[in-house]
Image: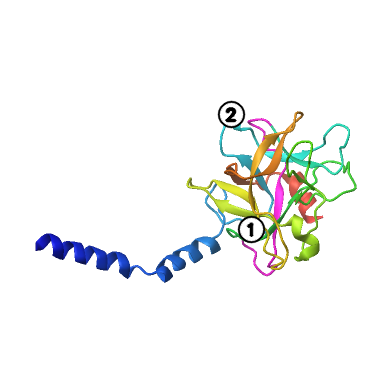
């Protein structure tokens, strides 16, 4: 009898946790702010280095790469371990929100620290399908703002991993509810010349976001000029 009573009580507890309870938890997680490597909220308009959270063979930070034969538009490439790369700046589809949040549509753009080589923008976007490589590569020359069908390829998301301050990028735009679009995580891949970002049907590659220090005057000048 005691066993039966205990079983009934356990079932009562389990089924008392309603789907709405789960939804509440998911909603909170989805709207949570993305955190940098210091545990602070990521802010729009602020430069951050995007660096692999896997050290050594996992490589370093992201930067604009220029493939031989077709240097423009630049691609989203990765430097070697120990190199932070070139900072990026995030922009929300909701321009009134200054915090970068999980699973929200964002633009990502490299800060142009060097003399501009290409006439294209530094905003990330998903390129047309590369049949020779069988890849959807992430490149530059995207469009900042103006969320909708015409800018669909320029919107990305940040998703949380199970490790503190580690995140993955995802291409799964929601800026056009009636537009068909891919929905894939983003991983580092090798194109035969350089390591660069591409869509994947598997797990995304983990990155951390390192806020650029105030002492980096060259970056501050670019951002504010």
Q: In which quarter of the image is residue 107?
A: bottom right
Residue 129 % position (x, y): 77, 45
Q: Which residue is drawn at 87% across and 43% down?
A: 116
Which residue is label 1 attached to?
A: 43
Of labels 2 and 1, the one closer to you: 2
Residue 159 % position (x, y): 57, 53
Q: Nearer the viewer, residue 76 or 171?
A: 171
Q: Do the residues labelled 2 and 1 touch (CB within 8 Å)?
A: no
Residue span colored magenta: 80-100
Which residue is label 2 attached to?
A: 56
- Is 223 rendered above or below residue 75? below
Secondary element under disc 1, as helix, strand or loop, is loop
Dominant secondary structure of the magenta stretch?
Answer: loop
Residue 139 % position (x, y): 77, 45
Q: Residue at x 9, y 63 (%)?
A: 1
Question: Residue lying farthest right?
Answer: 119
Give how far apart the Cα atoms at labels 2 and 1 are: 28 Å
Q: Which colouring convention does the figure follow?
A: rainbow
Residue 109 % position (x, y): 75, 51
Q: Quadrant of residue 78?
A: top right
């Amino acid at each position: 009898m005691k066993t039966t009573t205990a079983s009934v009580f356990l079932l009562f507890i389990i089924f008392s946790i309603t789907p709405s309870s789960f939804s509440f938890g998911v909603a909170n997680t989805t709207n949570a702010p993305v955190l940098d490597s210091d545990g602070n909220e990521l802010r729009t308009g602020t430069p951050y280095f995007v660096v692999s959270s896997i050290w050594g063979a996992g490589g370093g930070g992201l930067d604009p790469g220029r493939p031989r034969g077709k240097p423009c538009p630049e691609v989203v490439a990765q430097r070697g371990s120990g190199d932070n790369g070139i900072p990026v700046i995030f922009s929300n589809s909701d321009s009134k929100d200054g915090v970068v949040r999980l699973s929200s549509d964002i633009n990502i753009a490299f800060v142009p620290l060097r003399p501009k080589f290409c006439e294209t923008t530094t905003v990330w976007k998903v390129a047309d399908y590369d049949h020779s490589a069988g890849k959807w590569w992430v490149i530059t020359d995207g469009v900042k703002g103006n969320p909708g069908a015409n800018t669909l390829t320029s919107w990305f998301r940040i998703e949380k991993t199970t490790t503190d301050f580690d995140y993955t990028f995802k291409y799964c735009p929601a800026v056009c509810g009636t537009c068909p679009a891919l929905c894939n995580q983003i991983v580092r891949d090798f194109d035969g010349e350089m390591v660069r970002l591409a869509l994947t049907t598997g797990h995304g590659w983990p990155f951390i976001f390192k806020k650029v220090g105030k002492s980096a005057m060259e970056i501050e000048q670019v951002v504010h000029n």
